[in-house]
Image: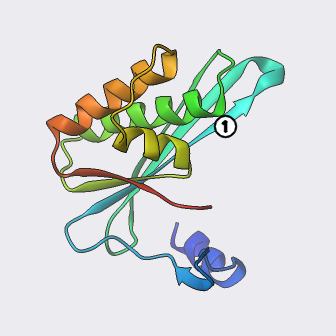
Amino acid sequence: MQQWQEVYKHHSPPILQHKKNRVQVWEKPTESWLKCNVDAAFHDCNHITSFACCVGDSREQFIRAQTKWQRAIMTVLEGEAVVLLKALHFVDANRWDWVFFQSDSYTLVQALSSSGHGDSEVYAIVFSISYQLSLHSNFKVKFVRR
């Protein structure tokens, strides 16, 4: 694992974000917080949506990851919502506290902070996510551009 990390450090570009004409470098979580990156992938030919989350600490050390898949064709927003909900359950099952979740779905993060309601499957998942977040005041969701 250490060899892979060394190769990755030397052969990978830094993760950068452009924001208001300035470059923002990725920041590790503050001491005592964990970071959980979440993402979904869509394999429409096979009618499969896959989900992954990866947890790391403030020393940039890998802690644990989870991958799952489901035979279903989902919209991007549905997939991103499902992976976040699965990650919340994964983190809760591991009894971790002080976790921020990073999603590259701006729409999902905005939906979590709005009071709007809808009748779609997505809003049912967003409601479930909001409920889980209300049970864990030390869980935060942030948007990150990838």
**In the image, farthest residue toward the front:** 116
Which residue has dot 1 on it?
A: 41
Residue 29 locus on image (x, y percent) = 33, 70
Q: Nearer the viewer, residue 140 or 67?
A: 140
Residue at the location (71% across, 80% down)?
Answer: 11
Is residue 43 positioned above or below 22 on the image? above
Rendered residue at 50%/16% (across/down)? 121
Number of on-image labels: 1
Q: Tell me the crowding category of disc 1: few under 14, some 14 to 19, or many 20 or more residues within 10 angstroms, Cα based.
A: some
Quadrant including the C terminus: bottom right
Circle 1: residue type: Ala
Residue 2 as seen in the image, left or right of residue 132: right
Residue 25 or residue 21, whichever sits in front:
21
Residue 144 percent location from the top left of the image = 51, 60
Residue 62, position as x, y percentages in the image: 41, 61
79 in relation to 60, above or below: above
Residue shown at the point (58%, 74%) measured from the top left: 3
Quadrant hosting residue 61:
bottom left
Please tell me which residue lies in front, 120 or 69: 120
Dot 1 falls on a residue whose secondary structure is strand
Q: Toward the viewer: 49 or 59?
A: 49
